[in-house]
Amino acid sequence: MTSLVDNGFLGTGWAFPVGCDPEQGISLTGGGAAAIRQSIWLILGTAPGERVMRPDFGCGIHDVVFDVNDTSTAGRVSRSVRDALTRWEPRIDVLDIYAAPDPDDRHRLLIEINYRVRSNNSRFNLVYPFYVA
């Protein structure tokens, strides 16, 4: 199955954040799992309405930025993340999403995403810190 990752089956694209590569011009992702991870960060970091030509792209977690950092907010965030990833990242199956207030920082909500890459059944997890006021 590693040949699927090596030949770019999972896709490549511009690296995020966008940068310059002295050999190729624009920095590109390595493809595979790295490209998917960057895509997830992009989806979660983009609020709907932020992209000019794609106003529905993104995740609704930005609607709760001024809410109280509690379990109710964590539940809303978990739902928004699941909906956004299901819609915008077709290369993965979302297995579980856990959102909980960070015990070390009362303004941070930690979102743990467990997912499986559909093409090779590899499992990954990612923790996305989301800050509330």
Image (tube, helix red, strand yellow):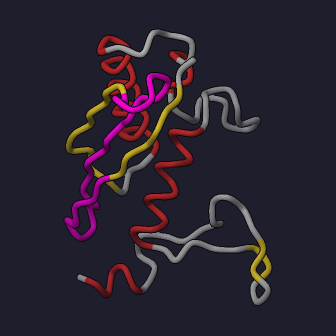
Taking the magenta stretch, the answer to whether it contains residue 2 is no
Residue at the spot x=29%, y=54% of the render? 125
Identity of the residue drawn at 29% across and 15% down: 71
Please state the horizontal and vertical placement of residue 16, each as a whole percent of the image.
63, 59
User: Where's residue 83, x and y in %?
Assistant: 37, 30
Relative to the observer, which residue lies in front, 127 or 20?
A: 127
78 vs 86, nearest the viewer: 78
Residue pictured at 27% horizontal, 67% vertical: 119
Vertical side of 116 occupied by 96: above or below:
above
Relative to residue 60, is residue 116 depicted above or below? below
Tell me: 1 left or right of 110.
Answer: left
Horizontally, residue 31 falls left or right of residue 80, namely: right
Give the image quarter of residue 104.
Answer: top left
Closer-to-camera residue (52/25): 25
Quarter holding the C terminus?
A: top right
What segment is highlighted magenta in the picture? 102-125
| Residue found at x 65% / y 66% | 14
Q: Could you say which quadrant of the image residue 32 lies in?
A: bottom left
Q: Residue furthest front?
A: 104
The reply, left or right, for residue 22 in relation to residue 48 is right
